[in-house]
Every structure is written in structure tokens, then in C-alpha cells.
Amino acid sequence: MEFAEVVTGLWDSWEDDALVRDQQSGGVFDPNKLHTPNHRGKHFVVRGPLNVARSPQGRPVLVQAGASDTGRELAAHTAERVFTAQTTFEQGKEFYTDVRSRLARYGRSQDGAKIMPGFYPVVGRTESEAGDARSAPRNF
């Protein structure tokens, strides 16, 4: 979680229009639009700002995948998208409800992270054949 806080702070060092590059005045950036993170945490000590301009999209989308308790907590704290691959509708519903309920702990709205369920189609000539294939051991 701390790593995500550090890189997000660095990515957000520069506002979208902070670099002005004004040849007339010689100004390169608007100092009011520069934010200097000064992170001191358990694992990282980082003073910004990031030494490159902000990208056109601002920063990457933070995606988390993992259904463990730790993974769900990380998703609630940092993720904008959460990938999951539950095998039943009931498991998927439980995962969705659980992750969404954790968002509030971090001051995030219930829509703060979008859940992206995986899709694992099982095809057979009949429903019975597909059911047999679904329960067969898989080697991924």
C-alpha cells in the first residue's frame, strides 16, 4: 500500500497544465501547479517531484488482482479496477460485496473501484458434457 501511495504522489507532482514553456518570459513551469511530495514511511523515504512531465493520461490506472484477504484490502485501498476470477455466481457476488464494503475504510465511495469479473466459458455439445468439462482438472 505504501508503494502505491509513493508512486501516486510522484505521478501527481505536476498538474496537467503546470509546464508552460513560455519562451518570451523564460518560464518553464507554473510553481503553483507543482506539488512536492515528501514521503517518510515504513519502507520508503521519497522527496519529489517526479523529474519528468506528466503524461497525457495523467497516470496509469491502478489495477489489482487477487482474492486473498490481503489482496482485497489492497484493492480497497488503492485500486481503480479489480480483476477477479470467481468460479460461481455466489462467489463472485461475495467478492464484489466484500471489496465494495472495504472501500469506506479508506474514505472511498462504493464506486471508487470497478470490479472486473473474469470469464471462463465451458463449452460442450450438451449441458452434461460441459458440466463434466467444468469439473475436470485444469492445467493452466
Image (cartoon, helix red, strand yellow):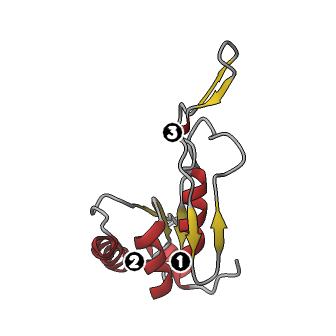
Q: Amino acid at mark 1?
A: Gly
Q: Amino acid at mark 2?
A: Thr
Q: Which callout, 1 or 2, points at the residue further toward the start of the chain?
A: 1
Give the quarter of the figure containing the C terminus: bottom right
Q: CA distance from mark 3 to mark 1?
A: 36 Å
Q: Residue drawn 53% across and 77% down? A: 66
Q: Amino acid at mark 3?
A: Lys
Q: Residue 122: in sight, yes or no?
A: no
Q: Is residue 29 left or right of residue 64?
A: right
Q: Is residue 108 left or right of residue 132?
A: left
Image quadrant assignment for residue 10: bottom right
Q: Which mark is residue 88?
A: 2
Q: CA distance from mark 2 to mark 3?
A: 48 Å
Q: Which mark is residue 33?
A: 3
Mark 1: give few (<14), some (14-19) or many (20+) Cα within 10 Å.
some
Q: Which callout, 3 or 1, points at the residue further toward the start of the chain?
A: 3
Q: Residue drawn 30% across and 58% down? A: 111
